[in-house]
């Protein structure tokens, strides 16, 4: 048996890598679409489903969107309604990760509350391209 040429080894390695998926930690979801359109869709859907719908789970909060971020990492912040300049209670970021594509992440104090499962389910569904709101709890 003859040894493989370096070019063959490289091609085989690339093919195997392309077949592997990146395991993302909880709160991180692969997105359907590129960075800009995903950020715009996420911001619009969060606004419609959590705020304009009157969802009681998000009463007392407001949304601040930074879609055209100079950092290249758009984010949607959920802050307390009456705290100007206060710390975000939830941050939803959209970024591109090598090997994973566009990824939507949700983190912050609200993910350590009973809303955690709801937030993660909504963000995962919306990252995949859905615009459907969940039934308000």
Image (cartoon, helix red, strand yellow):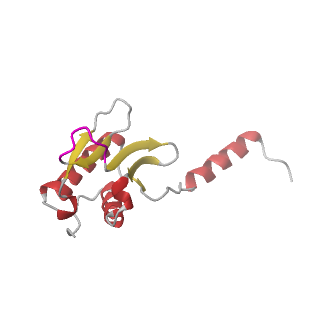
Q: Quadrant of the N terminus?
A: bottom right
Residue 86 on image: x %, y %:
27, 42
Give the extent of the magenta segment: 82-88
Taking the view exactly as shown, the residue that stands out farthest to the top is: 70
Q: Is residue 14 left or right of residue 127?
A: right
Q: Residue at x 27, y 50 (%)?
A: 42
Residue 87 on image: x %, y %:
31, 43
Quarter-of-image position of residue 52: bottom left
Magenta-colored segment: predominant secondary structure = loop
State yes or no: residue 112 in magenta. no
Q: Residue 48 or 59: which is nearer the viewer?
A: 59
Residue 38 on image: x %, y %:
31, 46
Q: Residue at x 37, y 58 (%)?
A: 111
Q: Residue 114 or 51: which is nearer the viewer?
A: 114
Quarter-of-image position of residue 112: bottom left
Q: Quadrant of the C terminus?
A: bottom left
The tally of labels here is 0
Residue 37 on image: x %, y %:
29, 43
Question: Image height check: is 119 above or below 6?
Answer: below
State yes or no: residue 85 in magenta. yes
Q: Is residue 47 left or right of residue 4?
A: left
Question: Image height check: is 122 above or below 64?
Answer: below
Quarter-of-image position of residue 134: bottom left
Question: Image height check: is 95 above or below 54?
Answer: above
């Amino acid at each position: 048996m003859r040894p493989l040429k370096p070019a063959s080894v490289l091609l085989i390695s690339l093919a195997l890598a392309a077949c592997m998926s990146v395991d993302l930690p909880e709160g991180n979801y692969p997105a359907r679409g590129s960075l800009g359109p995903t950020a715009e869709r996420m911001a619009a859907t969060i606004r419609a489903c959590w705020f304009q719908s009157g969802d009681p789970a998000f009463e007392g909060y407001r949304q601040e969107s930074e879609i055209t971020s100079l950092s290249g990492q758009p984010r949607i912040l959920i802050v307390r309604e009456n705290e100007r300049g206060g710390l975000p209670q939830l941050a939803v970021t959209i970024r591109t990760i090598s090997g994973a594509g566009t990824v939507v992440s949700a983190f912050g104090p609200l993910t350590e509350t009973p809303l955690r499962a709801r937030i993660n389910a909504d963000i995962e569904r919306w990252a995949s391209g859905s615009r459907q709101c969940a039934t308000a709890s």
